[in-house]
Image: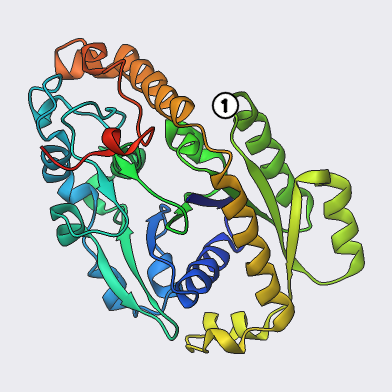
Amino acid sequence: MKIAFVGKGGSGKTTLSALFIRHLAAAGRPVLAVDADINQHLGPALGLTDDQSAALPSLGAHLPGIKEYLRGGNPLIRSAEEMIKTTPPGRGSRLLRIVEENPVYAACARPIALDEGSVRLLATGAFTEEDLGVACYHSKVGAVELLLNHLVDGRDEYVVTDMTAGSDSFASGLFTRFDLTFLVAEPTRKGVSVYRQYRDYAQDFGVRLRVVGNKVQSQDDLDFLRREVGEDLLTSFGHSDWVRRLEQGAQPPLRALEAANRAVLDELRTAADAAYDLRDPRRYTDQAVLFHLRNAESWANAKVGIDLATQVDPDFVLGDEPAAAGAAV
């Protein structure tokens, strides 16, 4: 399953995404964690020190090598220089799997041992001084979009991505790359305003969206969310001394998380597993092609110097059948 966590800044989406990652790992599930937020906090939320988090390799810094690997023997893509963030795979492309070893993971992913289980973490990399006035953060997030366009995942395998805050996710096609998106919302007007914005943007693309209330401390809070969000409200996470200890720098074991809040994590997993049965490989592939053609027409053809529409393999569907998800060529 490909799962995203979104929400306004300060909503607690990184904390909840980290808790969900820990919960899956504790159940023995393979997890690839991705920090795609402009503020790189997922590593510390998973137990890394600030120095360890800062030392994580940046996907953006390895983008040329990632492109070269994924291009493989695809005859429609003549060179890595002709690939952009939305380039879709085709016959001959190399595809990624969650449970495997490959040069991309070797260069960019780092294992994190948790108190229960372990995960691999990928990070886009922080926005640096060299980027100021020169680059857009979405150029870094583009590496995540490229990876998800080439990733084949199975049941009981999880990619969990902590997305950038607010509506910035819609600056690319990345928001369509998930089986289910959890929007973390506080019981406030600002919290639900981000939900409405995300819902309105996402509905035209069939994005499955469920709301997770956070910092819910009373029945009034819960009633507010139910009134404002309606049936999209899946569950709510209450006050947590465990989370407070984590935010203070401690590393409490997951088994010490409050029973009611751990039950919330079970609800998230149930919803994620149900979303797997609803996936549509043809639509997933078609949406990748749609955003690729949009980017090609708006800026990429002029930058690369070719018609990038020629890179589209009309007969290829990612994950449609085992043969389509073949190994490297």
Q: Position of residue 310 (x, y in %)?
A: 21, 12
Does residue 292 sit above or below 23 in this rendering? above
Relative depth, front residue between 288 and 138: 288
Q: In which quarter of the image is residue 259?
A: bottom right
Does residue 271 sit above or below 267 in this rendering? above
Q: Where is residue 87 in the image (x, y as percent from the top left)?
A: 27, 27
Q: Position of residue 239 (x, y in %)?
A: 73, 77
**What type is the residue that disc 1 sits on?**
Phe
Q: Quadrant of the C terminus?
A: top left
Residue under the point 17% across and 44% down: 66
Mark 1, residue position: 205
Does residue 81 sit above or below 116 in this rendering? above
183 on left or right of 135: right
Residue under the point 23% across and 56% down: 58
75 on left or right of 299: left
Q: Residues within 10 Å of mark 1 (few under 14, many from 20)?
A: few
Q: Can residue 102 be seen in this view?
A: yes
